[in-house]
Image (cartoon, helix red, strand yellow):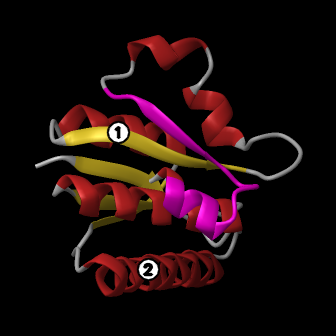
């Protein structure tokens, strides 16, 4: 089954990428795999405080993933796969791409202004030619109507 891999956070460009991936999956009979990458928190000398910070980050990431999964299901009737993992987002994406041969495309959202974002820069840079799937970049400046027309 054709799967669209999308990295999400709480940004507007991420929401647009998620919408695009969901609409493409619905139109092609596919599914969506969402990733929430949790940054490693700065080291705190007290173990209990460190554990609390990591747990709060995990809970926030899971809440973002759950909200996205609910939106995908409500909007298209698709139950997405969800990965919430701590670490470098680009490394997590590469790991999932290597493991899952059903992924048809990596869908990323680019910021509406300023630099496009670290993942867009990473996956469109020097290593882009070695990726096993196409990268679809959704401009953050698109309205929902424009996005719907394109997807």
Residue occupied by mark 2 = 62
43 or 142, which lies in front? 142
**Residue at x-position 29% and y-position 82%:** 73
What's drawn in magenta, residue-wise?
Answer: 133-149
Q: Which callout, 1 or 2, points at the residue further toward the start of the chain? A: 2
The answer to whether residue 80 is left or right of residue 24 is left
Question: What secondary structure is marked by label 1?
Answer: strand
Q: Are marks 1 and 2 in contact (CB under 8 Å)?
A: no
The answer to whether residue 27 is left or right of residue 128 is left
Judge the density around disc 2: few (<14), some (14-19), many (≥20) Cα neighbours within 10 Å.
some
- What mark, if any, has residue 123 been given in the picture? none
Question: Could you say where residue 21 lies in the image, as x and y percent from the top left?
Answer: 40, 56
Q: Residue furthest left?
A: 1
Distance, label 1 to label 2, CA atoms, is 23 Å
The answer to whether residue 81 is left or right of residue 118 is left
Q: With respect to residue 121, does 49 lie above or below?
A: below
Q: With respect to residue 140, does 79 lie above or below?
A: below
- What mark, if any, has residue 105 been given in the picture? 1
**Residue at x-position 25% and y-position 32%:** 98
Q: Is residue 147 magenta?
A: yes
Task: Single out the mark in the foreground, 1 or 2.
Answer: 1
Mark yes or no: residue 17 visible.
no
2 or 127, which lies in front? 2
**Residue at x-position 83% and y-position 40%:** 115
Mark yes or no: residue 74 visible.
yes
The answer to whether residue 140 is left or right of residue 6 is right
């Amino acid at each position: 089954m054709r799967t669209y891999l999308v990295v999400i956070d709480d940004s507007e460009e991420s929401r647009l990428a998620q919408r695009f991936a969901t609409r493409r999956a619905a139109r092609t009979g596919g599914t969506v795999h969402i990733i929430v990458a949790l940054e490693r928190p700065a080291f705190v000398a007290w173990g209990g405080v460190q554990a609390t910070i990591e747990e709060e980050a995990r809970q926030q990431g899971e809440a973002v993933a759950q909200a996205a999964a609910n939106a995908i299901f409500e909007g298209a009737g698709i139950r997405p796969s969800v990965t919430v993992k701590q670490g470098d987002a680009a490394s997590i994406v590469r790991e999932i791409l290597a493991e899952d041969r059903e992924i048809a495309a990596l869908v990323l959202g680019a910021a509406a202004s300023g630099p496009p974002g670290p993942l867009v820069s990473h996956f469109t840079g020097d290593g882009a030619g070695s990726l096993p799937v196409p990268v679809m970049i959704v401009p953050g400046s698109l309205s929902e109507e424009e996005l719907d027309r394109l997807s």
